[in-house]
Amino acid sequence: MTQSSSLALTLTPDDEHNRVLAKLTHPPQWLSPVPKGRYNLVVVGAGTAGLVAAAGAAGLGARVALIERHQTGGDCLNTGCVPSKAVIRAARAAYDAANAAPFGVSTPAAPVVDFAAVMERMRRLRARIAPNDSFERFSGLGVDMYQGEAKFVSGTRVEVNGVALDFSKAVIASGARAAVPPIPGLADAGFYTNETVFNLTSLAKRWLVLGAGPIGCELAQSFRRFGAEVMVMALDARLLPREDADASEVLRRRFAKEGIRTELGVKPVKVERVGEVRLVTFDRDGKADTVEVDALLVATGRAPNVEGLGFEAAGVAFDKRGVTVDDALRTTNPRIYASGDVAGRWQFTHAADAMSRIVLQNALFWGRKKASVLTIPWATYTDPEIAHVGLSEAEARQRGLDAVTYTVPLSDVDRAILESDDEGFARLHAERKSGRILGATLVGRDAGDLIGEMSLAVTNKLTLGQLAATIHPYPTRAEAWKRIGDLHSRTRLTPLVKRLFERLLAWQR
């Protein structure tokens, strides 16, 4: 065994759950193995992209090394998907308890949120999931696990803790981090990002969320449901700017209903700290205004981790957007590939997984798989959730496709009505002549789960006719897709066809 890494990991708060997490994802005094010749694959970074690549290659019989300087599991386990969804679920419980009266359920008093208990639950569940991504598990899978800083020293060699690892192929999966805008005074005033906000054990009374993307919107709503005053501020003119405008508007109305203030299309110009208060000045149409808050959450995007990894020595091109890759996810060094947030325009856990599967085929087996053919769905876990897959209507037009769009409001779907949760809609875009489904958007509770059916449809080029012929259980929200299939079927009943049917039926009488 080689020497253990000297990189220390401090998680706050120091409780039993975080100690378990640290032991699994950054074990103290981990003894890295001694390299036994050239590796088939060296993977830099043990987030989702790196873990999938390493496990897949080892399972196929390859000699694999995986290097991680911080925590296995990456953002998803430690500071992203896992902790945020635990917090969102607790926030929904608080909201449902406070709004139970319309269902005939009364409570003797307003529900009380124990924020420390909310966060303790999150840490407990995160630690429960962590063994899936642990050093021990991957070592047991046959992966040589190295803890330390990786640096390429040539096109075929990486060094970690002074140990040289030679490789036939390598994968860069170094991920991304929270991007911080250059607002004067922001650093001095102090702020949270997704990388630090889940360390909280108490919740400030007044929050300003900078950024109207998924992270900002999800946590803004959660903090409001826990009882904080919340404002969302963004340069973008609407929430979730990647989504359809009317989808964003549904969420904006919900935010307004829940008491979340939005300042959109404005520019923060400076931040001042006065005692424990932050004064944030912003520009709205040339006029300055100031808001006073107790805490700031910066959620303005992600920046790829490309610094200090020796890419120049390896002949790997990169810029501020990340590592440069071709459609096979190969870098400018044909021996080195990249996957996940450091190389993809889709910064999602499931996208990183899919990209690494392409990398394995192309790097180890001379495959010709292309990232451009991937159908990547996504979801924002606000309430209502907003999910999308495939092309939008505008994208279909840009590709020269003759597309038709069908929209069914959830107010027409029985299950949504029965649950008094009928904000939102289901929408499909399809090729007019063939009926091939091109894309879909769903706004409503559990949209992230329900979009999977349309991801299958887009991936396999299914048609609206096939959708109409699919039986869905009643009553479910998924019936919205069935209703769209039926809408399409009715468009095929032209006046001429109807007259022919009338004559046929008259003859049968």
Image (cartoon, helix red, strand yellow):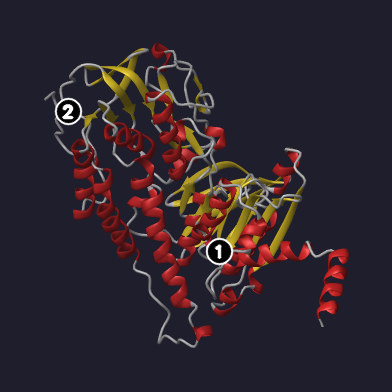
Quadrant in which the C terminus is drawn? bottom right
Label 2 and label 1: CA atoms lie apart by 46 Å
Which amino acid does the dot numbered 1 rest on? Pro
Residue indicated by mark 2: 32
Give the numbered dot on residue 384: 1
First of labels 2, 1 by sequence position: 2
Q: Quadrant of residue 33?
A: top left
**For residue 42, above or below residue 441:** above
In this orientation, does residue 266 appear? no
Give the numbered dot on residue 344: none
Residue 43 locus on image (x, y percent): 33, 27
Left or right of 241: which side holds 315? left
Left or right of 221: which side holds 263? right
| Front one among 216 and 155 | 155
Which amino acid does the dot numbered 2 rest on? Ser
Residue 142 locus on image (x, y percent): 21, 33
Left or right of 459: which side holds 205? left
Residue 273 locus on image (x, y percent): 47, 46
Mark 1 Cα-neighbour bin, 10 Å: few <14, some 14–19, many ≥20: many
Residue under the point 52% across and 72% down: 473
